[in-house]
Amino acid sequence: MSDLYGLVLEPMNNRLVNYGVTENGIAVIELASNSAGGPLEGDEMGPNCYTHEMMSDIDDAIIKARFDDSVTVIVLTGNGAKFFSAGASIRMLNSVTPGFKYNFCLHANETLSRLEQTPKLVIAALNGHAVGGGLEIAMAADIRIARKNAGKMGLPEINLGVLAGTGGTARLTRLIGKAKAMEFMVTGELFSFEDGLEMNLLNHIWEGDASDFRRDVLDWASQFTLPNKAVKAVGNIKRSCQTGPEIPFEYHLALERELQSALFSSSDAKEGIAAYVEKRVANFTGQ
């Protein structure tokens, strides 16, 4: 749709994240900052480097989407056509104390964990390079879609004498396996979106310019909105997939049974089963 489902983006408190909700319930969180981590001015387009202030804006946007009953899907993306995010602002890191850096990483960990635990589907739309902390943000999403030939990805923190400390070592290892994750992090090598797809780090790569890409992502995300999908079921699937692998298998099965039991009591389960029997399209309400 040419109007992007009525999407209007407004800046969050620190003007480092833009936020808006489409008419069909997709919350868009757009990272938008310069290389110093400051707000974009005029026609400026980001590398979308993040600071503590940007993480605070992301955190606020996640909570805003979480508490908005009209929102069923969250799309994370970057401003412009070149970068999803180039990661943490090196200028910022060069100017703060080790204590501040520790708490900066701690808050970022909490923010991205909050994103993972939000019972709404989160899609990272990689409109450009996702490097360092930018990839760390993307890895906290449930589904990752990249724009063809728009950039590279990787965790090159080794070149700064540090590691990917916003969940990077933990999430990359879990997503692609220890051997490849270790290699990429100790070499600092960046890799193509095609390589990311082959390693199952990405779900899809789509062609098109930045505008077409955003429209295509919103079109695709619409299948997960009401009345198309039972959003409680999506949320419970997410919880089982996020929590289950971290606990013993028998406990995962027990968690799965409890989540299923809760869904069987929902109106949407009754509607979905009835629609199947009656050979019609289900009309889910989120109840």
Image (cartoon, rainbow, N blue to C red):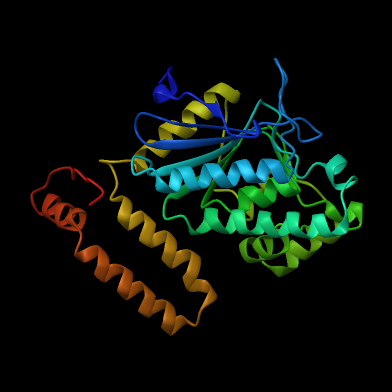
Extreme-left residue of the structure: 278
Residue at screen point 53% across, 53% down:
115
Image coords of residue 85 (percent x, y): 70, 39
Give the mark count.
Answer: 0
Q: Quadrant of the N terminus?
A: top left
- 233 over 138 or under it: above or below: below
- 40 over 276 or under it: above or below: above
Q: Is residue 107 left or right of residue 187?
A: left
Residue at screen point 73% across, 41% down:
50
Q: Nearer the viewer, residue 167 or 203?
A: 167
Residue at screen point 62% across, 58% down:
110
- 281 over 113 or under it: above or below: above
Q: Nearer the viewer, residue 22 or 208?
A: 22
Name which quarter of the figure residue 86 lies in: top right
Name which quarter of the figure residue 60 lies in: top right
Image coords of residue 192 (percent x, y): 72, 43
Q: Is residue 68 visible?
A: yes
Image coords of residue 126 (percent x, y): 62, 38
Q: Is residue 29 left or right of residue 268?
A: right
Q: Nearer the viewer, residue 212 or 243?
A: 243
Q: Is residue 79 left or right of residue 123?
A: right
- 227 over 211 or under it: above or below: below
Q: Is residue 188 visible?
A: no
Image coords of residue 273 (percent x, y): 15, 57
